[in-house]
Amino acid sequence: MPGLGFVLAAGRDSGAFIMTLSVGLLAIGAYVGLTHRSSVLALAVDPSRLLIATGAVVLLGSCWICIVVSSHKLLRPVSLTATGRLAGSAFVGLLCFGIAVRPLSPRRP
């Protein structure tokens, strides 16, 4: 859950804000998807509106990557060996790669 790392690293205010924001965006998305189905379908076929939606998804993904990297920096133990730091950084890099690539992968029926 985005923001949980900040809560665990004693940044409770920023972590609570990020968690509330992500739950709120998820709730708004679910509400719009369930109640305004025709608007969502119109968004999917209108190229200009789809470009705006793509920009919003890229912006949210970039923010999520920043949160993952910041959480890793806050929670990384100082006493780790060089191998441990490398493994942690590689895992965070894989997570960020997964966030960046997932919205771009094609859906299969």
Image (cartoon, rainbow, N blue to C red):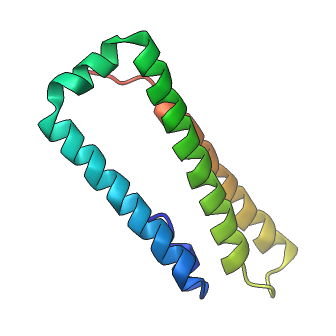
Q: Which quarter shows the C terminus?
A: top left
Give 81 or 103, whichever is nearer the viewer. Answer: 103
Residue 19 or residue 65, whichever sits in front: 19
Horizontal arrangement in the rendering, residue 15 relative to residue 94 (left or right): left
Vertical comparison of 6 with 79: above or below: above
Closest to the observer, 27 or 6: 27
x 49%, y 67%: residue:
18
Left/right of residue 25 with respect to residue 63 in the rendered view: left
Residue 48, horizontal then vertical, whole percent? 45, 14
| Quarter of the figure with the N terminus | bottom left
| Residue 9 in picture, x, y percent from top left | 61, 84
Q: Which residue is drawn at 56% across and 75% down?
A: 14
Q: Which residue lies furthest to the left in this view?
A: 35
- Tell me: residue 107, above or below residue 33: above
Residue 104, percent from left and from top: 51, 28
Q: How many labels does the image show?
A: 0
Instruction: Answer whether residue 58 is visible to the viewer in this image.
Output: yes
* Depth order, front residue of 95/6: 6
Res 50 → quadrant: top left
As drawn, is 20 to the left or to the right of 79?
left
Residue 3's x, y, as percent? 51, 69
At 43% from the left edge and 11% from the top edge, which residue is drawn? 47
Residue positioned 49% across, 37% down in the render: 57
- Relative to 88, say whether 52 is above or below: above
Q: Which residue lies furthest to the right in this view?
A: 82
Q: Work out whether residue 98 can be spotted.
A: no
